[in-house]
Image (cartoon, grey):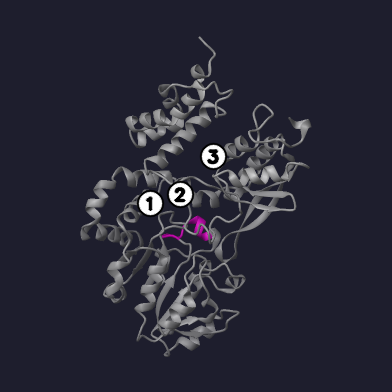
Amino acid sequence: MSDSPVNRIPSISQLMELRPLKELAHKVSSSTVAAGVKAYLQPYQKLAMEAAPALPYTSLQSLASEISDWILGEQGLGRPEVINASGQVLSTEFPVGPLSDEIVVQAHARRHDYLQASSQKSYRQAIEQLLCDMTGAESALVLKDRKAAAFLLAQASHRVSTVVPRSQMSATFDGIALPKLLEEAGVKEIGSSNETDLSQLSTEINGQAERLFWFDRTNFWSEGAKAIPPTADALEKLKSAGASMWVTVGVAGLETDSLHEELGLCGAKQAIQAGANVVMLGAGFLLGGPGCGIVLGNSASLEQIAKLPIVEYLRADSVSLAELEACLRIHQSGERIDDRIPVRSLLSTMPENLDLRATRLAEQLVSSPWIAEAQTESAEVCVLPGGLKLPTRHIVIQAAAEGQEPLLAHLQAFPSVASFAAEKGRIVLDMRTVFPRNDAQIVSKLVPENGSHEGCETGNPEKT
């Protein structure tokens, strides 16, 4: 057999036997994947015909993974995957969190059914009823996003004596301007601005207000958020004040499980059981779904919100409903939820696992001509709003003498990298926020197999 570049191009059938593409074929269809592989290989064939010295892939396995990601993007089955090594699982730039491939693929597989069904009121009502069944709420609304939900809650408080702790009157981490929103609705501030004393709040509320807005501390990035008591404590100590409790649970999901308990979070179901009349949450965050907003509660309170004329313009679209349903089915199944919801997967990873991955990755990275040193160190990072910290492991990279600019330029040009910390020639990768599947991607982009790297003209000659 000739050793020409053309003969070194793998066949479609050969690639489809590899795990990434085989799994994708089960989720979508073999014909879709085969067509995608064929289209993806066309540039390779052109390179081969032009007698390119090397084909642009490091291994068949990495090529299969790249093709799988490409098919997901080309077919509208997924969003481009990013590598976030910043130390924040959720941030102002990426507040909702990533959707799992399972959710995206399931929603796409029945997209036409969903589009037809979601134009009917019965489909939307079925999703809202599912939320009620899972939380014990009497009624539910699914809206475009959390901003829409917060706006409706504020609008429903016009002409109702409503108060909010002064310590919670700041913009949320995902951009909701609470001060302006609540001031325009006539909501009155009570309590101190730098602390939240539940006994003081109870005294001020008692007989003086019909409604209390309470925002869990994970709504805020500000340092002062740490002083806000846990939502479960607030519900227990303030319910005797007699005001209707309208609670926004921040990044929490539907149910308070072991992960919520570890982080001190109150899920929507727990809040309703504790006496909250209305609960607002995001469908992303620890729930792991799309960016829509969810409002749950008793029928009387939800009716006040639903009768607002603008509600019909703020409902979630059909794609969000489809993705939300797929997400809810994962939670309803109770099977491997932490593995199937990406954000939860990152948060639930044991420190020992992070240590092993960091050590292995650092050993591989140090062979790069751009890198002089790669060491690991223990750290504790604020991975979520509200000052919630978890232990993690950092890889601290020291660039080679002439490799700093090429290393930073390549990282910044690498489309998969969302963010990382860089200062004084040091690059810090936080393993708490990097998925295990991304480890090999980082290595493949920074460590050449044969001691050279495309576009690398500088570096440590002793490593090449």
Q: Mark 3 against mark 2, which lies toward the viewer? A: 3
Q: Quadrant of the C terminus?
A: top right
Q: Earlier in the sequence, mark 1 or mark 3?
A: 1
Q: Residue 333 vs residue 376: left or right?
A: left
Find the residue positioned furthest to the top.
Answer: 1
Front-most of 378 and 45? 45
Q: Is residue 119 magenta?
A: no
Badge 3 density bin: few <14, some 14–19, many ≥20, Cα 10 Å: few
Front-most of 238 and 167? 167
Query: Pointers 1 and 2 in contact (CB under 8 A)?
Result: yes
Q: Residue 436 vs residue 276: left or right?
A: right
In space, the residues marked 3 and 2 are separated at their CA atoms by 14 Å
Q: As displayed, is residue 119 above or below residue 445?
A: below
Residue holding disc 1: 327
Residue 319 seen in this snapshot: yes
Q: Residue at x 59, y 45 (%)?
A: 413
Rendered location of residue 335, percent (x, y): 41, 46
Q: Mark 1 against mark 3, which lies toward the viewer? A: 3
In space, the residues marked 1 and 3 are separated at their CA atoms by 21 Å
Residue holding disc 3: 437
Residue holding disc 2: 341
**Which label belongs to residue 417?**
none
Rendered location of residue 271, percent (x, y): 42, 68
Badge 2 density bin: few <14, some 14–19, many ≥20, Cα 10 Å: many
Q: As displayed, is residue 272 above or below residue 382?
A: below
Front-most of 187 and 177? 177
Residue range in magenta is: 253-261
Badge 2 amino acid:
Ile
Q: Residue at x 39, y 77 (%)?
A: 154
Q: As displayed, is residue 344 above or below residue 198?
A: above
In space, the residues marked 1 and 2 are separated at their CA atoms by 8 Å
Badge 3 amino acid:
Arg
